[in-house]
Image (cartoon, rainbow, N blue to C red):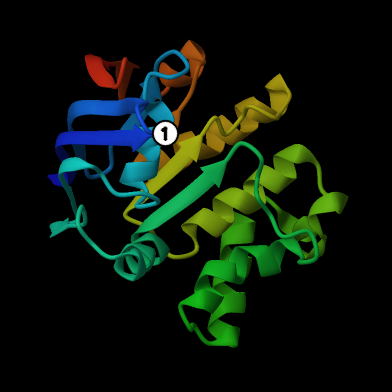
């Protein structure tokens, strides 16, 4: 079942009076429910722009983006923010945790903005902390955690709103190889549980763990490979 569709999607940036950058040039992509997709390509190929559009962080210049049956391509900023908060989970290379908050409090942040009651937020965040293997470390602040533990917090936070799609941008880029494999094992588990994941990566070994690899070049998808 198709969870999201990108139809002839374009994105153009105006960098000055006469400089136009075509970041995406007619991208078509169907994302199936429960699919685990790797997006690869050289720098400047459009990977990050594609991820931003799928994550409703930006809107396309042209084309359509259907997410969960809703055309989100022409929504207002406020409407995009609402979709982002309820339907998308983000995992970043740099973790993006709030340093003053504990791991549990960081996990709760999306639920706070959705107006979820405090007791329900705490129960949900503790469940997710346990699921990603934080255990007794959940009440520590980010600076007291290892890189791998911080990324586990970020993954738990991304799952807190039960998103339709989980997006990850080079999620192991700041981790050593052993910790990176642990995080990828966690992604494998989420995929096995039916989560829809899209990960941007330069690493072919990471891409090989996914269901499908999408190769980009010059703002276009140039190849799909089933893994």
Residue farthest to the right, as pictured: 144
Residue occupying image coordinates x 50% and y 17%: 202
Q: Which residue is mark 1?
A: 16
- Residue at the image point whose x is 79% and y is 54% from the top: 142
Residue appearing at x 37%, y 33% in the figure: 17
Could you tell me which residue is drawn at 69 percent across and 66 percent down? Answer: 104
Camera-nearest residue between 43 and 150 = 43
Residue 71, by quadrant, is bottom left
Of helix, strand and loop, which one carries label 1? loop
State whether residue 9 is above or below residue 18: below
Between 159 and 61, the one nearer to me in the picture: 61
Q: Position of residue 77 (x, y in %)?
A: 34, 64
Residue 176 can be seen, yes or no: yes
**Left or right side of 178 for 43:** left
Can you tell which quarter of the image residue 101 is in? bottom right
Q: Residues within 10 Å of mark 1 (few under 14, many from 20)?
A: few
> 124 or 218: which is nearer to us?
218
Out of 149 and 65, give the one closest to the viewer.
Answer: 65
Using the rendered image of the protein, determine whether residue 132 is visible from the camera's viewpoint.
no
Identify the image quadrant of the C terminus.
top left
**Where residue 75 sits in the image (x, y, percent)?**
23, 62
| Horizontal side, residue 98 vs residue 41: left or right | right
Quadrant (top left/top right/bottom left/bottom right) for the N terminus: top left
Q: Is residue 201 above or below residue 127?
A: above
Q: Position of residue 33 (x, y in %)?
A: 23, 45
Determine whether 54 is above or below 100 in the image. Answer: above
């Amino acid at each position: 079942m198709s969870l999201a569709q990108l139809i002839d999607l374009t994105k153009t940036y105006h960098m000055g009076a006469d400089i136009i950058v075509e970041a995406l040039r007619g991208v078509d992509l169907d994302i199936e429910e429960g699919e685990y997709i790797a997006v690869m390509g050289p720098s400047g190929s459009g990977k990050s722009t594609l991820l931003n559009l799928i994550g409703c962080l930006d809107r396309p210049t042209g084309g359509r983006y259907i997410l969960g049956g809703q055309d989100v391509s022409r929504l207002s900023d406020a409407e995009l923010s609402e979709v982002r908060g309820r339907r998308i989970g983000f995992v970043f290379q740099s973790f993006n945790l709030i340093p003053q908050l504990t791991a549990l409090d960081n996990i709760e942040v999306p639920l706070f903005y959705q107006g979820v009651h405090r007791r329900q937020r705490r129960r949900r965040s503790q469940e997710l902390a346990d699921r990603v293997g934080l255990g007794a470390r959940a009440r520590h602040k980010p600076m007291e955690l290892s890189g791998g533990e911080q990324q586990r917090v970020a993954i738990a936070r991304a799952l807190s709103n039960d998103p339709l799609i989980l997006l990850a941008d080079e999620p192991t880029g700041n981790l050593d190889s052993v910790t990176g494999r642990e995080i990828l094992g966690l992604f494998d588990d989420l995929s096995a549980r039916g989560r829809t994941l899209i990960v941007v990566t330069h690493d072919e070994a990471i891409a090989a763990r996914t269901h499908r690899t999408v190769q980009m070049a010059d703002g276009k998808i140039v190849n799909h490979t089933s893994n």
